[in-house]
Image: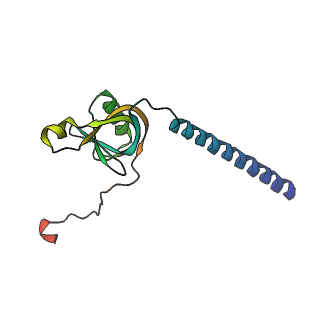
Amino acid sequence: MKQLIILSFLVLSLISCKNDQNSSQEEEVVIKEIEQEPLADGEEIFRGEFIYYDDTAVLNTSRELYAVKVDDKMRELVDVAKAIKKSEYDMANVVIHGTLGPNPRHLETGDAWEEMITITKIIEVSPAKSANVITTGKTLDIKEVK
């Protein structure tokens, strides 16, 4: 009787492992299809941390900071990002298609990012994995900081 129970557990564990491998292969296929999607002329794929605050949108990639054009697509991205943010200052990891051009504000005043992204398609939005804010739980007086 013990052998029958042990044998049945072995069979069940093998079957469950086989299903896990198939599901992970399906996920890889979906990711590859998204990456292989053709881009229109002038479009690029951008990956980075997105934040929108006080009528200013910024995308922080691993290489560069870009201004993001405030339009309907950007507002759609803000609405999706709000659902996953814990506070209004949190960033969201995004993958977007967009076109890159000069930033009109930088051309006028010289105090903004040189390039601006115009979002054409939102591919993925996820919570930022880490925050640059450290919480200690202690309130410091300015005199204590040296």
Residue at left 27%, top 41%? 115
The percent coordinates of residue 32 (x first, y second) are 56, 40
Residue at left 86%, top 57%? 3
Q: In this view, does 110 lie to the left or right of 71?
A: left
Q: Is residue 146 above or below residue 4?
A: below
Q: In which quarter of the image is residue 145?
A: bottom left
Residue that lies at the very extreme toward the front in this rendered image: 41
The percent coordinates of residue 65 (x first, y second) are 29, 47
Q: Is residue 60 above or below residue 54?
A: below
* Of the pair 1 and 93, the residue shown nearer to us: 93
Q: Quadrant of residue 143?
A: bottom left
Exactly how many numbered labels are in the figure?
Answer: 0
**Quadrant housing the N terminus:** bottom right
The percent coordinates of residue 61 (x first, y second) are 35, 48
The percent coordinates of residue 116 (x first, y second) are 28, 38
**Quadrant housing the C terminus:** bottom left
Which color scheme did the rendering employ for the protein?
rainbow
Q: In this view, does 4 lie to the left or right of 119?
A: right
Q: In this view, does 43 lie above or below 62?
A: above
Residue at left 38%, top 32%? 42
Residue at left 13%, top 66%? 142
